[in-house]
């Protein structure tokens, strides 16, 4: 988004506000505190920022392209938000972004070749500088499936990011979300667009099991961790929604919510692997590996409920979110006369 171009900033849903307020017992620990969001211009960051602004925190959005978060400016009071250009591969850039931080969250994620630099090394440096600044809380957003010995660069670098963060900031909170969904995501909306356009669609990893989590629930968890490091510091949480769904089920639910009769073809794994290896495809080899493994909470770690947050199911939102993908959109809805 170019500077000066404003997109509609989606307000936090009332349900997410209620969950957050219940979990934090109306605490004001972040009031006027400087919170730095590294990678705050992305999908998760925009939702976390709205939570923090509502809590009265002073917010610094530090990102490679901070102008992508300019749409949040109308939500901030005068002097409440600051933007900083930050390259997490450069130590001086991170040090500058962390100056004066009372708390910080590291939200950078990528499926690219720079995963180690962006998801692990940058996170370790950010945690180190946060500690030097005397920050009381640091939160690292990892992922379910993070594993040091994984053959997936994404999962391996997330695990190393956790290690580096905890070495530099032992009281940090690690959050491992499942696949995130939201009204403005690139997950549900990608499949929804395809379903709205084609009568027959391939489904990769049709039996892969996912536990999709609402982005606002994850944002509430980040805020909870930053607000109460004594309760959540030094712990790792798995953040997952209440329902376990296969990729096939997700596609069928999207079609039903659009009111469309669609046929789905479950792509054999061998063929899917070949597709993922081709250049220019929307799913790379690393993403295919992760999809095959699924993304379901292990149950061995605390979760959203342990942070005072009630997770919201995807089904709660589908009917409303899929309106724009129906044949006539909102104009195709019949309303009953009074």
Image (cartoon, helix red, strand yellow):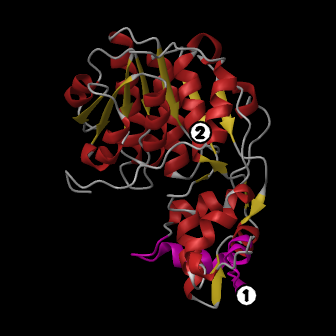
Can you tell which quarter of the image residue 322 is in? bottom right
271 drawn magenta: yes
Mark-to-mark CA distance, 2 and 1? 33 Å
Residue in view at x 72 percent, y 52 percent = 211
Few, some or many residues within 10 Å of mark 2 (<14, 14–19, 20+): many
Secondary structure beneath disc 2?
A: helix
Give the magenta-colored segment's residue range.
253-282
Disc marking residue 261: 1
**Which residue position is annotated with label 2?**
218
Residue 211 or 315: which is nearer the viewer?
315
Secondary structure beneath disc 1?
A: loop
Q: Examine the rendering and report whether any part of residue 122 can be seen.
A: yes
Residue in view at x 37 percent, y 17 percent = 130
Few, some or many residues within 10 Å of mark 1 (<14, 14–19, 20+): few
Q: Please state the horizontal and vertical placement of residue 230, each as a whole percent of the image.
A: 60, 10
Q: Are marks 2 and 1 in contact (CB under 8 Å)?
A: no
């Amino acid at each position: 988004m170019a500077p000066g171009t404003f997109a509609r900033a989606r307000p936090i849903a009332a349900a997410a506000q209620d969950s957050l307020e219940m979990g934090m017992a109306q605490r004001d620990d972040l009031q006027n505190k400087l919170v730095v969001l590294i990678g705050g211009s992305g999908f998760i960051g925009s939702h976390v920022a709205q939570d923090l602004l509502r809590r009265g925190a002073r917010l610094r959005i530090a990102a490679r392209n901070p102008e992508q978060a300019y749409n949040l400016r109308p939500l901030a009071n005068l002097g409440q938000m600051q933007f900083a250009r930050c390259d997490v591969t450069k130590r001086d850039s991170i040090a500058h972004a962390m100056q004066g931080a009372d708390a910080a969250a590291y939200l950078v994620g990528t499926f690219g070749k720079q995963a180690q630099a962006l998801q692990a090394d940058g996170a370790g440096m950010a945690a180190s500088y946060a500690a030097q600044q005397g920050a009381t809380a640091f939160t690292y957003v990892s992922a379910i499936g993070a594993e040091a010995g994984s053959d997936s660069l994404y999962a391996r670098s997330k695990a190393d990011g956790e290690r580096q963060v905890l070495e530099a900031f032992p009281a940090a909170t690690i959050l491992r979300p499942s696949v995130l969904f939201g009204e403005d995501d690139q997950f549900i909306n990608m499949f929804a667009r395809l379903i709205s356009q084609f009568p027959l669609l391939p489904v990769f990893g049709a039996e892969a099991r996912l536990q999709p989590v609402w982005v606002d629930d994850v944002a509430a968890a980040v805020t909870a961790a930053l607000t109460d490091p004594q309760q959540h510091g030094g712990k790792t949480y798995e953040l997952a929604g209440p329902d376990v769904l296969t990729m096939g089920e997700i596609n069928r639910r999207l079609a039903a919510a659009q009111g469309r009769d669609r046929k789905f073809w479950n792509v054999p794994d061998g063929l899917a692997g070949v597709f993922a290896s081709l250049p220019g495809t929307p799913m790379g080899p690393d993403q295919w590996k992760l999809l095959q493994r699924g993304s379901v909470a292990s149950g061995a770690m605390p979760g959203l409920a342990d942070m005072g947050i009630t997770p919201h199911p995807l089904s709660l939102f589908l009917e409303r979110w899929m309106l724009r993908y129906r044949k006539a959109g909102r104009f195709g809805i019949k309303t009953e006369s009074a």
